[in-house]
Image (cartoon, rainbow, N blue to C red):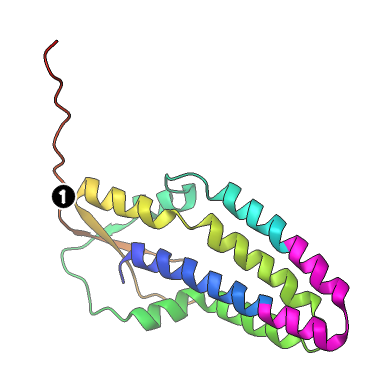
Amino acid sequence: MPFADFVKTTVLLSAAAATTLAAVTLLSARAAGEPGTATIAIGWWAVACLIGVAMGRRAATSPPIARLLGGAKVVRALPPQRPGRILLARLWPLLLSTLVAGGLALLWPQIPAIATGFALIWALAWRQQHGAIVAIERRDGVRFHVDETSPLRPITLSRTPGFKAYLPTERRSPA
């Protein structure tokens, strides 16, 4: 699976998890008759959005992604790709935390409210990384792909040849 697509999918799934958990929070707070929980949750979500926007304001790659790209092994041909399996193996903590927090809403509506904030931070902090990865791929003429590894091992990347972007240089008119 192309790494840039993986990052974009991670952002979208984190935003989807935040949306689902926010709805669960509001419904469970209403069912429990705790309007204060919803009010505090909305405040926390606003703070989480500010934190996520501040963390993701740079258009450059984050240091962890830069290290990951730098450590990518060079391959000439990729094995067959299974995007669904790669996503499940890499994003199982997001799935598990969403399910657990959503399930605990039956007992404590505060739990999914807190988890919503962290999913918002994650989605907003990583929102520009896709563009930075694509820019590096175009500049260097490579493609980065997520390797299929154990869900308990760190993520690894493969680097394959791609198409290099030859951009015209800026011409200055004689003065």
133 within the magenta span: no
What is the quadrant of residue 101 in the picture?
Answer: bottom right
Question: Image quadrant for the C terminus?
Answer: top left
- The residue that disc 1 covers is 164
Q: Which residue is depicted at the point 39% across and 57% down?
A: 130
| Side of 104 relative to 22 (left or right) | right
Query: How many numbered discs sit on the rendered protein?
Result: 1
Is residue 51 in view from this perspective?
yes
Compare residues 76 and 28 and report the one nearer the observer: 28
Q: Quadrant location of the N terminus?
A: bottom left
Q: Main secondary structure of the magenta part?
A: helix
- Would you place residue 105 above or below residue 140 in this image? below
Residue 64 percent coordinates (x, y)? 48, 52
**Range of magenta residues:** 23-44
Q: Is residue 153 visible?
A: no
Instruction: Please report the residue visible at 31 percent of the width from the left and 81 percent of the height from the top.
Output: 82
Q: Residue furthest top?
A: 175
* Residue shown at 55% from the left, 58% from the top: 124
Q: x, y percentage for residue 30?
A: 81, 84
Q: Nearer the viewer, residue 47 or 85?
A: 47
Q: Nearer the viewer, residue 144 or 156?
A: 144
Percent x, y of residue 87? 42, 77
What residue type is disc 1 on? Lys
- Residue 172, by quadrant, is top left
